[in-house]
Amino acid sequence: MKSDQNNPSKMFKEPFHAHLYAYIDKRAGKKTAAKTYQPPIEFRFIEEMHSYGFTETPSVIVRDKIQRLQAPGDKKCQKSGWYIYFEYPDSDDPTQTFALGVFGSWRGNPEKVIWTSKSRTEMTSAQIDHIEAKISEAREAQEKERLASNELVAVEAEGIIASGRPADVDHPYLVRKQIKPFGIVQVEDSLVVPVICSEDGEIISVQYIDQDGSKRFLKGGRTKGGCFQICGDTEKGIYICEGYATGASIAEATGGEVYAAFNANNLKPVHENVQKKHPGQVIHIAGDDDCWTDGNPGRMKAQKITGAQVIFPIFQNYENGKPTDFNDLHVREGLLEVQKQLSVLPLEQASEETGVNNRWSKPFPEHCLKVDGLMGEVCNWINRTALVPQPVLTLGATLVMFAGLFGRRYNFPNTNTHTNLFVIGVAASGGGKDHARKCIKSILSEAELGHLIAGGEFTSGAALKSALWRNPVLIAFLDEFGKYLAATTGRNASSYQSTFVKNLMEFYSDSGSVHNGTEYSIHGINEKDRPKRQDIYNPSINVYGTTTPSTLFDVLRGGDVLSGFLNRMLVFEGNERASILGNSLRNTIDRNPPENLVNRIRQAYLSTPEPQVPKGSQLAEIKPILRKVRLEASAITSLEDIVHGQEEKRLDGKERFPDLWVRAFENTVKLAMIRAICDDPKNPVILVHHVEWARDIVWWCIENMSLKLEANLSDSQREKNSKEILQFISQAGKAGRTRAEITRKFQRMNKRDRDEILEELIEIGSILSQQVSMAKSKKPTQVFVVT
């Protein structure tokens, strides 16, 4: 009975009063037209609240005064919702009643909804003015009540904190969550967490946490912009999360400064205030992945925050419970796993620790590795399951995977750019370059997207065309890419092998249009036997090739720069000193991709449908349905700056390889598109931080490649030998190389050439010669060190 009273649609499903009036008229001998019964006007307002999820509505609506009620998502003891309702005679017809109702939630779900008994198009200007006045009146009344209540609660909260005792370390909640009591107090059996205004540091409320984990705030208190701060070393990171338990796990794992915002709606205001306190520093949003809740509010709210690095926990499995946050990760997989997922060692720091001279390598921009959203979760999973972690190579491989997933499905209409991407991952043998490739193949297969994976190699350009005709979107993982290039471009390559690179470049350029197939002669061939011309709409071939540095640079020539082959490639160089000690063996046992991650990748792929293929036709010859990737207005200036930067580099006479910059803008747009689509596949928008992130990666790839080419491309054998010796000395860092080490390494050179090269390098100031005392030698030893 109670549920029917709270549901107007059930209460008035049978128009009882209408039947009663008709019965009375009939007994009186009257013939009356059927009367349509209208329920009381306030019940239409209740129905409107029901449509927004306010199910616990009152049976009697109070007028002219703000009332509290449960809002969507509130627990039994919570009332974050409110409404105010007015009724007065209709100015057009005094016999009728006009009603205005306003409702919402102080938690913002929804923030405010305005309802009127008449649509705005039916109102007179006087009625509209009257409504605006009433809305203003309601707003003032709401604000006045809120401020008064906030002040009283703030005073009460200070008293509660002052009367509390330090929290017991063996409190059942703390024990179950495996966390410490960082500055919280205890009142009787409940933990009490102060709610601090993130703007001015004043106490504004408290949160009670009972032994069973039940939580509640003081009634009438303010929580918006409130947080609990766990002080730490800001150099080790600044983190914002939702709950106290999550914050405590993050603080213990990282040693950084943590702000617990209490709920997802509060992440944004807290971030804005923390950002003001720490200008110029990277702030990490350690979000909750509420995958068990409709709409995933934790993820949705966190991903809407701009100017922060957003990261979500990734779990080995989702059995035995519904894990969502970093405290769940702490309890299930240990504190070390929390640390690994939240922390990435800057390559600059690794270089300083080892003393390696970076003359021929440019440190990768560390902030670009801290990717949020779906892309970040894929990278984190790959890195934490790696025996030899290579986060830079992981990012490059992941970009290619998403480039393929979004191929022939999205475009950036401003420049007709598509997501197709060519990436080369470079690392030493045994340096961990294969792991990302294997992981991505695994996750695509689990997501039932294995058809996107191309064969192991292409024997010719014709083989590439044939593969794209069968499937116009392919992700090609080409191992030993340097040797593969040598086989297809070297002097001994056959005519059909030599067409591979040429066709690869053509398909890259044709991704935004149609690749016209080969025309065949009509002479001497029956029409039915003559091969059909195979036109491919928007071909998307995406390449992730892996190779060692020596193999790649041995095959590259100056002509590859001028031909446009290299400027289409983004070369990601791994950490040459990455070792098996980077991750514990414990994390490499289960490499199966998490089920939740697999499902989300498949959902992202299916967000844009493929066109229907008529019987007897190929998908490749059907024009695809393309979802447009929009550009936020504030990002336009950033893209314009990139165009200017590209042209300055290309036309700079001091640039050794200016042609590498020809496609800098295009590749930046591609990466920004991929990041935007990952964040929101159904409504992708390129934001400023997408552009800046993509620019930093592309700029690094080009500048680092320039250094590598300068070190490895030579006009003569003598110059090549000189560069190889200089690199060998450089790799030793501060320790340098002895003459004996150089002799052993370069035995193929005759002694005279070797000595002359060393003298030349000393003369031009590239290296220094030092006499160093060695433990095993009585005489000083000559050591060469890069300046």
Image (spheres, helix red, strand yellow):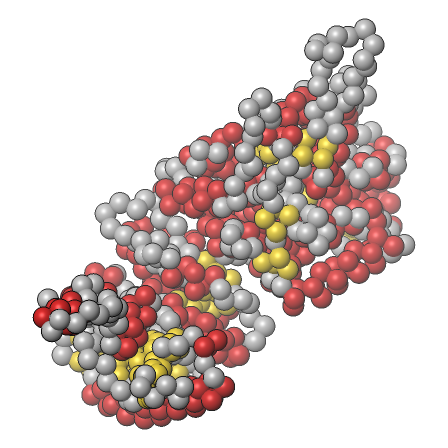
- Whether 721 is drawn above or below 205: the answer is above
- Whether 418 is drawn above or below 198: the answer is above
Residue 725 x, y percent position in the rendering: 76, 40
In the image, 488 versus 416, the foreground residue is: 416
Question: Which residue is pictured at 78% across the width and 50% down the height?
Answer: 661
- Whether 747 is drawn above or below 34: the answer is above
Left or right of 623? Residue 136 is left
Question: Which residue is pictured at 25% across the width and 61% down the height?
Answer: 178
Residue 583 visible to an observer of this rendering = no
Residue 251 x, y percent position in the rendering: 38, 66
Left or right of 462? Residue 391 is left
Residue 26 visible to an observer of this rendering = yes
Question: Which residue is pictured at 62% across the width and 63% down the height?
Answer: 632
In the image, 724 versus 22, the foreground residue is: 22
Left or right of 136? Residue 487 is right
Answer with the quarter of the image where residue 62 lies: bottom left
Residue 682 x, y percent position in the rendering: 51, 52
- Whether 453 is drawn above or below 691: the answer is above
Q: Quadrant of the N terminus?
A: bottom left
